[in-house]
Amino acid sequence: MKIYLKIWRQKNKDTKGQLEDHTLDNVSAEMSFLEMLDMLNLKLAKSGERPVEFDHDCREGICGQCGVMINGIAHGPLKNTTTCQLHMRSFKDGDTIYIEPFKAKAFPVIRDLKVDRTGFDDIIAAGGYVSVNTGQAPEANSIPVTHNEAEAAFDSAACIGCGACVATCKNASAALFTSAKISQFTHLPQGKKESAKRTVDMVNRMEELDFGHCTNTEACQIECPQDISVLNIAKMNFEYNKAKLKK
Amino acid sequence: MTKEIHANIPEGDLKDKWSNYKAKAKLVNPNNRKKLEVIVVGTGLAGASAAASLAEMGYKVKSFCFQDSPRRAHSVAAQGGVNAMKNYKNDGDSVFRMFYDTLKGGDFRSREANTYRLAECSASLIDQAVAQGVPFGREYSGYLRNRSFGGVQVSRTFYARGQTGQQLLLGSYQALMRQKETGQVKLYARHEMLDLVTIDGKAKGIIARNLDTGEIERHGAHAVILATGGFGKIYYLSTLAMGCNASAIWRAHKKGALMANPSWTQIHPTSLPQSGEYQSKLTLMSESLRNDGRIWVPQDKNETRKPKDIPEEERDYYLERKYPAFGNLAPRDIASRSAKEQIDAGKGIGALKNAVYLDFSHAIKEYGQDVIEERYGNLFTMYEKITGINAYKEPMKISPSAHFSMGGLWVDYDLMTTTPGLFAIGEANFSDHGANRLGANSLLQACVDGYYIAPYTLQNYLADEIQVAKTDVNHPAFDEAEKQVKSQLEKFVNLKGNKTAEEFHRELGKILYDKCGLSRSEDGLKKAITDIQNLREEFHENLLVPGDVEDINSELEKAGRVSDYFELAELMCIDALRREESCGAHFREEFQTEEGEAMRNDAEYSYSAAWEWSGQASEPILNKEPLKFEYVKPTQRNYK
Ligand SMILES: Cc1cc2nc3c(=O)[nH]c(=O)nc-3n(C[C@H](O)[C@H](O)[C@H](O)COP(=O)(O)OP(=O)(O)OC[C@H]3O[C@@H](n4cnc5c(N)ncnc54)[C@H](O)[C@@H]3O)c2cc1C
Ligand code: FES
């Protein structure tokens, strides 16, 4: 296949970026999207140009490190698929592909397609855990959790922290990410005791950082590689209000 | 001159050793802990759990990883499960049995005391993970669920769908972030350790590169823990992440720490086959699939029919045929080698004839698709995303792929290397898996090392460092290390050759996979050594690294990693060459039984090879740690 690329280049967060044109011949349908970028980078390197910086690590859809906007869609055209799992069979000969970084105020560009998602770590640090030290745990089966509750907790816990939800949201809200962690714990007896504090602290942290407000457009779930449900957001709002009332 | 190496195994009966150790280990008073600084490199299960646990105890911790967040360490990719001795199934499990399975799985090439401790501490890990909110699979009663994994006959594997590693890692990552919030941990993501700094023979800090800016930084501490994971990526095509590397342990090795059994690499039997030259990684399909999937190849090597059109009697379920007792659940080394046998005999399937079938049609018939979907749904989805094939309808195509490094830094019972103050935990060390790791035992090992062992043994070391002042990063040892690191980086950029690090890496990986992979021979290894030396020479003359040193530069990161791989690759071949026996994953063609099984030579090779850096990659010095078996009698492994 012949593929035309319009790819974002930006030196750092303080400079302006622009799209750059490149053409690749002999792209194979079996290639992954990132392998196509590898191909471009090899070509750039050989011709004395700077390769495009992009983030990736596991290349199997679980670490959450990859992620770019592909033709304006976070992680590209396939539903529930990370950039690294997208394959070139989703495109056809002669296609033009626009590749841009995840854009959000809270995700400043580091270079080209790489962005800084430290904000997500900060939200977790505010309360996304059960406060149990090593050694304090009781016997595992003394905390029964029904099959369905465990599965529901898992559904929320499956978030890979890639940031597609923020990049997709017109408000750049981190509500889906934050709510997934909050609801994971609402399904489990562990950590119930700190539920109210967790919710308030995490929501406050999200607002202190440069993430926007959720206006329920629900675009985030559609782009989420893990199909994390927007119902988590409703759950978070409920928990938040409940916590505020208690105060 | 060879080094004296002591495993420092505590006195007492096998089952009392760890308790005896803990009872006598030195402690540090809580007030003194805050004066002591510890560097933990790595935020996988081993690193995150150690960093969090040490911080909870009151130590000052600095935590490093090369990814943009600690949550992305490659532990995240583990799918199948984590073993622990809970005997919830009442199926005859015990600490001794788990210890024995692990030792036997490792083909009697690991230390009894360490392996026993792994089994002994396993139950606590499940308690800890559950308390953290890890959503393990549950029975309808609400109790924890188990499944079985290769190489054992009990069900001791706990799992969270096909994302066990992710869920366990998030548990320890969250514990780490909780400590970051208190200020007890300082986090350095997107930082790569490029050298170890030793002062008067003791580990005192590291040189790290800020990958966003290219800045070289000095970090001092009272002790350094390396939890930098496995180096299977050395084969280029592997199940590891793109950034996985050996650089941290290799550079520590060059500063004096010994490297043990570097050639012992587990080649996983169930990964997706390579489909083209451009390929950058091989995706693993969890071994748990072998619980319900049956592996086969057509009997006729010229077979052209679709798998479903091939009648039962014309299929060879070769694992079930050769190993009736374990069947499709034979240990990994055996399953991989058997697949290679079929592929080499021309019976491989797929366009490149490089794969075998993993078939779920029987299980779907027996349990229904919904049950299979609940067990492995995400794996089937992943398979379809990558291959475009629906595996509920036709069998998966799988093939062996480089996966896990049993070898690593040599450590004693305390998980301390031969460099005082330098500890190695998780996959970065060599300790518990012998010559072959059992499935679901390495998440466990990473966690046990980090949560339960390092916090005790490190404290035992730090107790003697209370009087020692904070490490001065202006010490000449830091100047020297920084100078070396900088000059190497500059050299890479200035070579201006015409082959990228990635291109060299592919070639190196191919040499290793062919000659130092699933099977090895004297001739092959000797040839590989010459090839590696030649390619390494070319690398140092013809490398192309675009961009600058003092800037973000992925190509430069790769260059450093590949440069270390070139040295380690040679050591792997030398290690494999010098071990004139077959054991576990190390299969020397010259040493096999009449039936083609691995033939150990206990009289001469019952030792761990602990290699010492001589200053010359081609002339490493061999030190031997003899393995003594007091509680079990090594037998020939039999899974028939
Ligand atoms: C695909 C796959 C599936 C697996 N499935 C299972 C399973 O089902 N069950 C099981 O028990 N085991 C499984 N394993 C093995 C298991 O996941 C690993 O052995 C284990 O997670 C290793 O943990 P770790 O903490 O030692 O290393 P990792 O999780 O790899 O972490 C390494 C850390 O070190 C950091 N690092 C590395 N080098 C540097 C450097 N130079 N400077 C700074 N930081 C550095 C990285 O950033 C990372 O944070 C699997 C492995 C793979 C690859
Ligand atoms: S690279 Fe890990 S999710 Fe894509």
Image: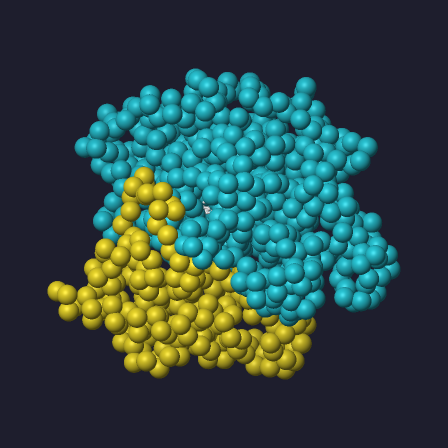
Q: Quadrant of the C terminus of chain A?
A: bottom left
Closer to us: B437 or A86: B437
Q: Is residue B415 left or right of residue B511?
A: left
Instruction: Write down the colour of chain A.
Output: yellow
Q: Residue at x 39, y 68 (%)?
A: A163
Q: Is residue B351 left or right of residue A31?
A: right
Outermost residue to the left: A247
Tell me residue A174's x, y (percent): 32, 70
Closer to us: B58 or A243: A243
Q: Which quarter of the figure has residue B500?
A: bottom right
Instruction: Write down the colour of chain B.
Output: cyan
Vertical side of B351 occupied by A213: above or below = below
Q: Is residue B200 left or right of residue B6?
A: left
Q: Residue at x 67, y 43 (%)?
A: B326
Q: Residue at x 65, y 80 (%)?
A: A93
Tell me residue A94's x, y (percent): 63, 82
Whether residue B580 appears in this view of the structure is yes
Tell me residue B419's x, y (percent): 43, 27
Q: How many marks?
A: 0
Tell me residue A65's x, y (percent): 45, 61
Whether residue A129 appears in this view of the structure is no
Q: Residue at x 29, y 41 (%)?
A: A136
Vertical side of B171 occupied by B108: above or below = above
Q: Is residue B441 left or right of residue A181?
A: right
Closer to us: B615 or B562: B562
Q: Quadrant of the N terminus of chain A?
A: bottom right
Closer to us: B317 or B279: B317
The colour scheme applied to this rendered structure is by chain
